[in-house]
Amino acid sequence: MGEPSQQKSYDGDIMHPSHLSLDFTMVYAVVVSGTSWNPCGHMLLKTRSGYFHVAEIKGRPRHMTEEGYKRYLVENGKREIRRTYVSIPNPGASYRKLQELLVKDWSWWVLPNNCAAFVEDVVRAGGSDAGLYFNCPTRERFR
């Protein structure tokens, strides 16, 4: 008899941008707790269209509905630490950047190209200067 399969915790769904109506009228950077090996926590982008983040060392960004986000927190043993409103002067440019990122693999390189960098890339494409200095979401505020 084989070993029981290990079911992976929910991290969201891979979506093609044409399947989403992306609404950037209200945007937040959301920080959740990390794991024992990651004291910096994790950052997601929240729009009216849902939550977006990179969840793998190499893979496409993920999307979650509000219900999916709640499931993600429970199944991954995470808690929300804070959410920060981000003003986007050019929402259309952020929309296009997220569409571009949703169809490409994202390679995680610890601090220089991590979950916070993903959020920064999207909001900065829309003209925001918000971000983190040290790319450690639990240790600093997204501003």
Image (cartoon, grey):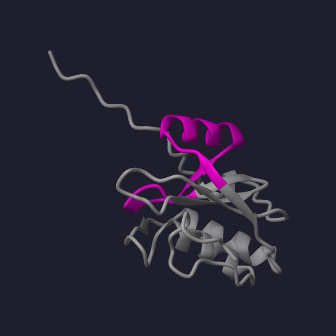
In the foreground, 143 or 4: 143
The residue range painted magenta reads 53-81
| Left or right side of 34 for 63 | right
Q: Which quadrant of the figure contains the N terminus?
A: top left
Percent position of residue 26, x then y: 82, 62
- Please report the residue visible at 65 percent of the width from the left and 71 percent of the height from the top: 141
In the foreground, 28 or 123: 28
Q: Which quadrant of the figure contains the C terminus?
A: bottom right
| Left or right side of 96 for 117 | left
- Please report the residue visible at 52 percent of the width from the left and 59 percent of the height from the top: 42
Percent position of residue 5, x then y: 28, 27
User: Is the residue 51 above or below the residue 7 in the image?
Assistant: below
Quadrant of the image occupied by residue 56: bottom left
| Left or right side of 38 for 82 | right
Residue at the far top: name it.
1
Residue at the far left: name it.
1
- Reply yes or no: does residue 76 show up in magenta: yes
- Reply yes or no: does residue 6 show up in magenta: no
User: Is the residue 109 above or below the residue 79 in the image?
Assistant: below
- Please report the residue visible at 55 percent of the width from the left and 66 percent of the height from the top: 137
Percent position of residue 23, x then y: 80, 60
Quadrant of the image occupied by residue 140: bottom right
Quadrant of the image occupied by residue 59: bottom left
- Please report the residue visible at 76 percent of the width from the left and 55 percent of the height from the top: 21
